Amino acid sequence: MTLATLLAVGWRRETAATREALALGMLLVIMMMTSPVCHLHYFPWLIPLISAIVWFRWERGASLYLGVGGAALIALNNVLHSLAHMRHLDRWLWLRDMGFCSYPGLALWTVGLVLLIRERHALGAERLDDAVISPAGPIPN
């Protein structure tokens, strides 16, 4: 996961704060998931990732509306954590014991990874177009 995140971010230092915020949020998720003990109170570390995803999309022309999938993912995260925190209800303890609260975090990490990879491919295509068209004219093949 760490390697995939670092490859998606790239080797060069970016000037885009949104890419850096998204990468930091993704690395926080990896830190939580690879920790030997991951307590439920660690999961507020998803907030920087969610904020970075919204900011990343908004800066690139998308609306602040997350869509059905994004809203459902955040709602699922909230419901799972609310139920897992209800220790007095024995029938919901399996959510806590089986690690079901981790899955929305992994899904958010995947969303961040997809956004970074898509933008990296788009930037690569733009840089390739800029390199092929020079002031002296197109470069012959």
Image (cartoon, helix red, strand yellow):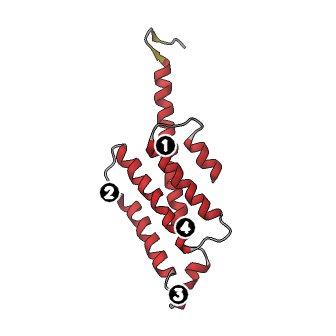
Q: At x 60% / y 45%, what residue is drawn?
A: 6
Q: Amino acid at mark 3?
A: Arg
Going from N to C along the chain, the mark reached first, 2 or 3, is 2
- Crowding at dot 4, Cα within 10 Å, few <14 / some 14-19 / many 20+, comes out as some
Work out how far the residue at label 2 is from the one at label 4, CA to CA, in angstroms: 22 Å
> Which residue in the structure is indicated by mark 3?
87
Q: CA distance from mark 1 to mark 3?
A: 41 Å
Residue to which mark 4 is pinned: 103
Q: Quadrant of the N terminus?
A: bottom right
- Which mark is nearer the camera, 2 or 3? 3
Between the C-alphas of marks 2 and 3, the distance is 34 Å
Q: Of helix, strand and loop, which one carries label 2?
A: loop
Which of the marked residues, 4 or 1, is nearer the chain's N terminus?
Answer: 4
Q: Tell me how far mark 4 sits from mark 1, CA to CA.
A: 22 Å
Residue designated by label 2: 65
Of label 2 and label 1, which has the lower sequence position? 2
Could you tell me residue 49's position as x and y percent?
A: 47, 57
- Dot 1 or dot 3: first in sequence order is 3
**How many residues crowd around disc 1 within 10 Å: few (fewer than 14), some, or many (20 or more)?**
few
